[in-house]
Amino acid sequence: MLTQIVTFLIFFSIVGCILYGRRLIKTEKVDAVFGNPERALGGTHWVIVGSSFLLLIWLYYSWDIAKGFYPKSANELCQVGKVNDSLLGLKYQFPIEERELKSTSQIKKENKNLKKITIEIQNSDTINDQYKTILINFINKTDQLIPLLTNDDLLENETKQKISDITGRINILTENFQKPDYPFETEQELNDRLKAVEEEGGWGITKINAGSGSIENTLEVPLIPATDRGLKFHAAAKELNSISDDFFKLRNHNPQFKNKIKEIKDEIKAFRKGLNDSEEVTSTYAKNIVKIARRIEFASIYPPNALNKMQNAIVKFDNAQLQAQGGLRFIDILLFPAGTIIASGPSCSEQGSGRWLPKPSDTFNKFILMSKPSVGYKDIPLLWIKMVDLSGLIGFIIPDWIADFLPGEYPVHTKDGIVKQNFKSTVLKVATGDFNLFKIPVPHGHIWDSFMRVFLGLVFGILIGVPLGLFMGLNRFAKGFFDPLIELYRPVPPLAWAPLIISVLGIDNTGKVFLLFMVSLSIMIISARAGASGTQLSKIHAAHSLGASKKQILRYVIFPNSLPEILTGIRVAVGMCWGTLVAAEFLAGTTGIGFVENVAKKYFQYEVIWITIFIMGMLGLLFDITLRKIIDKTIPWRGKG
């Protein structure tokens, strides 16, 4: 129901905003000339159109619209897929979906193989003439096997009767299939089936382990027929499987054929037995002739008109099942783009965009489950609040070495095994957070861990990179001294540093934050240096003329002039940090968005993978929007000078 409402809202939003935008264009007075940035401001309605269009494409190609409007369509297509899977082997024997009879194509193939091997034997320099004559004789006898199978006069009455029985079963199935109450289900069977359907769940239902609360599985397509139409196809598929098994067990082996092929096998066996090791090529050709004879033996080769009635019966049933699908065929065409539901044996699966593109409804449900502390992902929620004692935060902020600088010694236990605290040990307890105050709510989870790693790496990069970049842009010594070092490590991809840094600093937050610091540092240094060196000389001369000091020039002229470059560098650094963080969490980590995606990749959890992609995109967008606001507030003159 929710998907239907969302679909309608998206559709009306797109149409409404487009109409509003066209109306605004006609009535709005635009004073700005072409190329003026003012012309690109505003346009919230077009933002809504773009976002809604993307969401609508996602809903459509993930088949969520089909699931929302026709929730049982996947189950019905599953049953139809079972029928098509059962029919596939039978239809493959006839020129229904193929160009010719299977018997005809097999005969053409084996005749071609016999002709090819004959030419090879005749042109061979390693086989003597006597053996060539014997091998050619074997080929001629093998070639005589096929007419024994295609001769209608040699077709046994028992085989004819079995073909007639199978044809009759198909005709009876077609007749019953067209009846409205087929497969004649009793009330008890109906109740049992509906109960099983309820227990199985719906299309794309996420199952939760009641004991552990963890996500167990997502049922891709329900298998038990949930509708009368689905039951009809399900029952027909079972009968077709039985018919298909009986047909492929049938062999057109008349006495003449049996005697002939036995004779060929025995002669070739005796011939190969009499060959010595130096005549391996001759033995190999004899062996290949036996393989061809065996393929003819196990092939379903019949006289040309022996299966005509059976073919007509299959075509008749195929037309009946296509007609019985009714509106389901249009649902499949319109609402299942780039694929459909297919069956393989007893199971069904999504094949197409709906398989690798998770449905928004399923993705949202799984996101909610993964955000709950009782479920989470690997026992850790995506984002939640946990109560932490304030002492722990104090211990995190205050460095432990403060206690080491205080005069005196740490207490030593007495002979009675008692340790008396002194002022120095008390300060150490405060610095390490080894005391109790009161609990406060603190963010917790995979998202928070990744966010803080990026934030800390970016902050340290800004705090060190910006002053150093300004210094390099203003001082010859600083530029000459630091430039080789920066340019040496900057071109190296962050992932090349990751194994070294993680192996040295460990897999905890220290290694990841330092890696992100290295990524953001070079970007911030180059941005700040470019901003400082790009300051207009006339502004600096004007400041000197007005009596400004070096500090005043740096604060009021150079730094404001460098801000556009610095803030642009921060936006670039944010994107680089996110990409590097995910890769680092891929390599080593027990929490974070990259860790979640890495585990989900191993188990083909597409919903989880798309959730992580969406989260990274949203967090990156959050950073970027924040920076845009900062840019608008701090450098409103940008583009207007």
Image (spheres, rainbow, N blue to C red):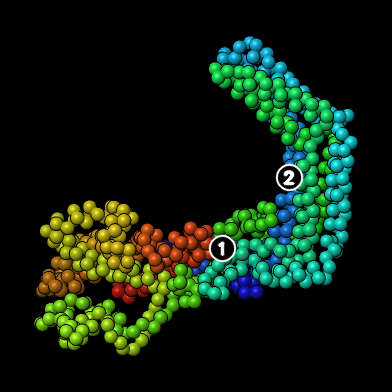
* Residue type at tag 1: Pro
Q: Extreme bottom residue here?
A: 438
**Mark 2 packing: few (<14 Cα in 10 Å), some, or many (20+)?**
some
Quadrant of the rendered image containing residue 324: bottom right
- Vertical order, 341 against 559 (above or below): above
* Residue type at tag 2: Gly
- Vertical order, 148 against 504 (above or below): above
Q: Extreme front residue here?
A: 416
Return the residue at label 2. Answer: 89
* Label 1 SS: loop
Q: How many numbered callouts? A: 2
Give the percent coordinates (x, y) of residue 432: 25, 79
Quadrant of the rendered image containing residue 7: bottom right
| Residue under the point 31% across and 53% down | 496
**Viewer-proximal residue, 567 or 602?**
602
Return the residue at label 1. Answer: 358
